[in-house]
Image (spheres, rainbow, N blue to C red):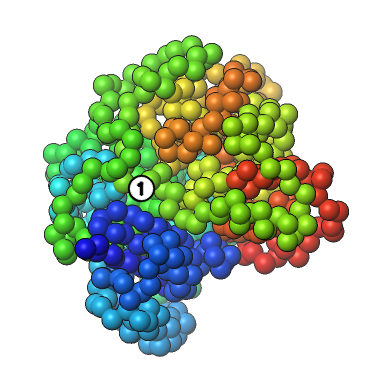
Amino acid sequence: MTTRILGISAYYHDSAACLIEDGTIVAAAQEERFTRKKHDASFPSRAIEYCLREAGITARQLDLVGFYEKPLVKFDRLLETYAACAPRGWRSYLTAMPLWLSEKLWMADDIAGQLEPYEGAVMFGEHHESHAASAFYPSPFEQAAIITIDGVGEWATSSIGFGRGHDIELLRELRFPHSLGLLYLAFTYFAGFRVNSGEYKVMGLAPFGQPKYVQTIKDHLVDVRDDGSLWMNMEYFTYPHGLTMTGERFARLFDGPPRKPEARITQREMDLARSVQEITEEVMLKMARFAHRETGMSDLCLAGGVALNCVGNGRLLREGPFENLWVQPAAGDAGGALGVALSLWHRYLGKRRTSPEVAGTWQRRPSRTIATKSASSLEGALSVPKYADGMNGSFLGPSFDDAEIGRFVESNGCHARKVDRGSLADEIAGLIADEQVVGLVQGRMEFGPRALGARSIIGDARSPRMQSALNLKVKYRESFRPFAPAVLRSDVADWFDLDDDSPYMLLVAQVRESRRLPAAPDTNAPWGLDRLHVPRSTVPAVTHVDYSARVHTVRRDTNPLFYDIIEAFYRRTGCPVIVNTSFNVRGEPIVCTPADAFRCFMNTHMDVLVLENHLLMKTEQPVVARDESWRSEFVLD
């Protein structure tokens, strides 16, 4: 008899639902993809509806439902914090309490009411235990150390432990208000970006700056210990009691008030970003070394919002003590829904783990040396170690079949050409090689914040114009933000200082020296954001100012069409690398449906839209006035 478990995360940010059947992940999605509200924190009713529909069941057929954290423990932390800070924090208290007293304290009743006719138990996990479960159980490791790092759960802000078989044990935790995640949030806020949304901008801005404030941070804000724990001087932070992250004392320390959102970015913000990024990487490395000593494990799993810091992850892989690293692709709170469901299956019901039913098995890499091979060869795939985890490539969301897309095209008066599947990849590769920007909707939508070829915008990585064109004319976002390279797994070591799988775009590596262009003379070198206009490699659209790239390795067994597109592009151009960015504009969630994709396509400067086998050229669509009000629906991140 099949056991079905629904996991839910909600009411902070990135609400999500996940359904597992006998320990296998059947479906998972964030609520934002359906409501079109980025980081939607509301109860994930539409995501749940999708998960049940994907499994072909109703709520009555669920055996267990789990929520990813313990609301009563979190409420206790809030009350203790407000009491300790009183009389400060009165406004924050009045803002928070109505929602807690009306909804959050009655979570079990709320969930049961939302899931009628479900009549079973509603279970509650701990926040960081849910993160740990999401990191370890889908990983390819039989045993591994586990590190979780985020802002705050109930009380914990980071944890260190290990998984073995179907059991997890957390050994140490760091507690609120001392938090690496909240430290990074404070600098995100101070740099003028949106908290719990703009942290990746700080990471992307860091290479433009100098570590000017590192010592200031260490002298005044935070004491970083050798074990990776930290103590924060709360005289400089207002988040325990206020409606902002930092106050006047923080501003005096860093040469003036916070940057206002959308104001010009100055060298100060670049230097602040670089400084907090360096502190973050130092803490991550120290935590990893301590976890290695404490657990004796050779492999490491990561989750929590800070695990999305792919620059730090890259350093962990290169410089850390662990042989292998696996990061949960939905590392933030959305992944907590998956974690609590898997935790109920393995820990509450005591079910053993089984090997993922995907191609191949995990093989330990022999060394960290970078192998070389001919860039013109397409035969290297056979020599790449096989790879397996339990995430199904993170393709866990809705898909739309050919008939559904045909009906959409016809009902909306679109001009589309149906292309035979055998020639589709080659045709798309030709369009990319001609510097066309292509929106791609194919297969099941990704779970997590990264587009991995199912809901992607793709382009020619060789084009020196592509990076600025995508940022300013398609994504409508800040010019400094880099794009990721999608590269054939067999060829990644020829182009980047990496010879590992990076299927979820969560590792940053350097572009290989052999692919770089000669540096400009120092006397003429631009500074700050002007450095964007200097080509740095033979794939300039995906090479950041410090020669780094957020690498996405692609295998055919995980995403056949996306692999075939890149391979066809390789045959045409000799380059196995294309641009891959998420299919959305700034402030918008990644597109889910054909309708979402078509609206984004028609209201940006994208050239081509591919909906499964249907190919739509912008120049062939009916002439309609661009809907300038469309982007105003989205809150800028």
Q: Which residue is mark 1?
A: 391
Q: Is residue 264 left or right of residue 497?
A: right
State the image coordinates of residue 241 (x, y, percent, origin top left): 40, 74
Q: Quadrant of the C terminus?
A: bottom right
State the image coordinates of residue 629 (x, y, percent, origin top left): 76, 65
Q: Quadrant of the N terminus?
A: bottom left
Q: Is residue 382 left or right of residue 517?
A: left
Give amino acid for label 1. Met
State the image coordinates of residue 385 (x, y, percent, origin top left): 32, 26
257 is higher (above) or lower (below) than 371: below
Choose between 262 and 112: the one closer to the eye: 112
Q: Residue at x 83, y 53 (%)?
A: 622
Q: Residue at x 33, y 35 (%)?
A: 359
Q: Secondary structure at mark 1?
A: loop
Q: Residues within 10 Å of mark 1 (few under 14, many from 20)?
A: many
Q: Quadrant of residue 240?
A: bottom left
Look at the image and tell me whether residue 188 can be seen.
no
